[in-house]
């Protein structure tokens, strides 16, 4: 068993870390405060090949493995989780979905510009009444000749207001329940699609999440992803892979919070010595480092299994569950290490604290992950 990353993986980590430190960190706090979508940084990520990491080179991607993808998302999120999730959505929810289920025409027309960073993607499953109960779709798609007419409202569409292509789930046959859901590749710039609001969020504020409405929106039949009734299967397959990205995001948030707390503990003095020399603080940092390493290994194992075409569903849920809870625990402890300074926006740990919480919620809550794991181990 080899726990060492390849030279290529280490070079990738250094490249992304340098980009994150030099290009992302200087504006992270200000963008978070202003809820400013990082348009220029997303373009630069595309130029670096970070928007289609695991997509085949023939479709504009970097052609790397999922361990590389996990490294990219971790390093981005270590500095700014908003950039991490923007890249994660485009990579594993959109590009992976099109490459896995799309036609050659869809790959040529949509996947290639998405993977190369010339376009941005979004994923649209949640609705006002369909969160964890993803099968409870109310948005409808009715066939009309060579088009489908879509009506409904979608919630929490990350990248929605800047997206060029959205994978959207809609009900084509309500009588069939979740087997009546179909996936579509919609153009949000076309008539009938509108942004209702951009959510004012606790964390990842630089990554926009939107409520979007479809009013007699017409989508050509060639933009249907997969067959009619295959949408729920497509969504679950995409989310299984996406959880590796969110696990990596959580590891990155935890790593960033830990590094900030470690550095602070070395220079902050109380009672005549650096606080890291106090056993309570030292033990807390030791627990942080241990949990982060465990979360990273779980994430890499899930990516390793996916790269080898092994069953990775349980591994991805375990990674997402443990890494997200590690991120929340580590960020909370980091604020405590900083004391009252941790409650101030002058220091980065309050942002890590706010960003960490979402990793326990989106792409399947911690409760849903436990359901998935319980189902898998009961087989």
Image (cartoon, rainbow, N blue to C red):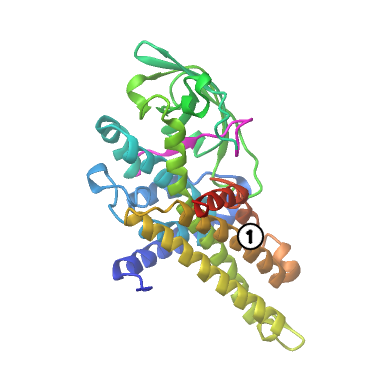
Where residue 306 appears, as percent x and y from the top left, is: 37, 54
The residue under the point 48% across, 29% down is: 169
Residue placed most toward the observer, 271 or 311: 311
118 within the magenta span: yes
**Residue 192 in view (yes/no):** no
Q: Which residue is mark 1?
A: 328
From what the image shows, is residue 280 above or below residue 303?
below
Where residue 131 appears, as percent x and y from the top left, is: 60, 37
Farthest bottom residue in view: 272
Farthest left residue in view: 58
Q: Main secondary structure of the magenta part?
A: loop
Where residue 191 appears, as percent x and y from the top left, is: 46, 18
370 within the magenta span: no
Farthest top residue in view: 145
Left-right relation of 125 to 270? left
Assign a secondary structure to mark 1: helix
Left-right relation of 27 to 303? right
Total numbered labels placed on residues in the image: 1
From what the image shows, is residue 215 above or below residue 311?
above
Q: Quadrant of residue 6?
A: bottom left
The residue under the point 70% across, 71% down is: 338
Residue placed most toward the observer, 311 or 36: 311
Residue placed most toward the observer, 260 or 330: 330
From what the image shows, is residue 369 above or below residue 282?
above
Left-right relation of 296 to 288? left
Range drawn in magenta = 117-132
Q: The N terminus lies in which quarter of the figure?
A: bottom left
Where residue 269 appears, as percent x and y from the top left, is: 71, 83
């Amino acid at each position: 068993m080899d726990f060492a990353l390849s030279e290529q993986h280490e070079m990738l980590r250094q490249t992304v870390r340098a980009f994150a430190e030099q290009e992302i960190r200087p504006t992270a706090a200000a963008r978070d405060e202003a809820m400013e979508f990082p348009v220029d940084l997303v373009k630069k990520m595309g130029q670096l090949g970070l928007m289609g990491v695991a997509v085949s080179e023939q479709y504009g991607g970097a052609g790397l493995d999922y361990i590389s993808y996990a490294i990219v998302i971790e390093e981005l999120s270590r500095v700014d989780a908003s950039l991490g999730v923007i890249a994660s959505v485009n990579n594993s929810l959109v590009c992976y979905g099109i490459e896995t289920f799309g036609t050659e025409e869809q790959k040529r027309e949509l996947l290639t510009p998405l993977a190369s960073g010339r376009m941005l993607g979004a994923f649209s499953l949640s609705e006002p009444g369909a969160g964890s109960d993803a099968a409870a779709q109310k948005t409808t798609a009715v066939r009309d000749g060579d088009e489908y007419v879509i009506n409904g409202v979608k919630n929490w569409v990350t990248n929605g207001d800047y997206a060029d292509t959205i994978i959207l789930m809609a009900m084509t046959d309500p009588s069939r329940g979740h087997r009546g859901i179909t996936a579509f590749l919609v153009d949000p710039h076309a008539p009938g699609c509108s942004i209702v609001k951009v959510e004012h969020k606790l964390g990842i504020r630089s990554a926009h999440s939107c409520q979007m409405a479809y009013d007699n929106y017409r989508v050509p039949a060639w933009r249907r992803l997969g067959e009619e009734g295959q949408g729920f299967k497509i969504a679950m397959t995409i989310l299984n892979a996406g959880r590796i990205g969110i696990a990596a995001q959580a590891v990155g948030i935890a790593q960033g919070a830990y590094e900030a707390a470690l550095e602070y503990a070395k220079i902050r003095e109380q009672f005549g010595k650096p606080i890291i020399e106090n056993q309570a603080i030292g033990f807390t940092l030791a627990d942080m480092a241990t949990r982060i390493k465990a979360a990273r290994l779980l994430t890499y194992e899930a990516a390793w299994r996916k790269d080898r075409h092994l069953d990775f569903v349980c591994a991805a849920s375990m990674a997402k569950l443990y890494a997200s809870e590690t991120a929340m625990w580590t960020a909370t402890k980091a604020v405590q290490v900083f004391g009252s300074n941790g409650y101030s926006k002058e220091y980065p740990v309050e942002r890590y604290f706010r960003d960490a919480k979402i990793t326990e919620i989106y792409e399947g809550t911690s409760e849903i992950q436990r359901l998935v794991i319980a189902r898998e181990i009961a087989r």
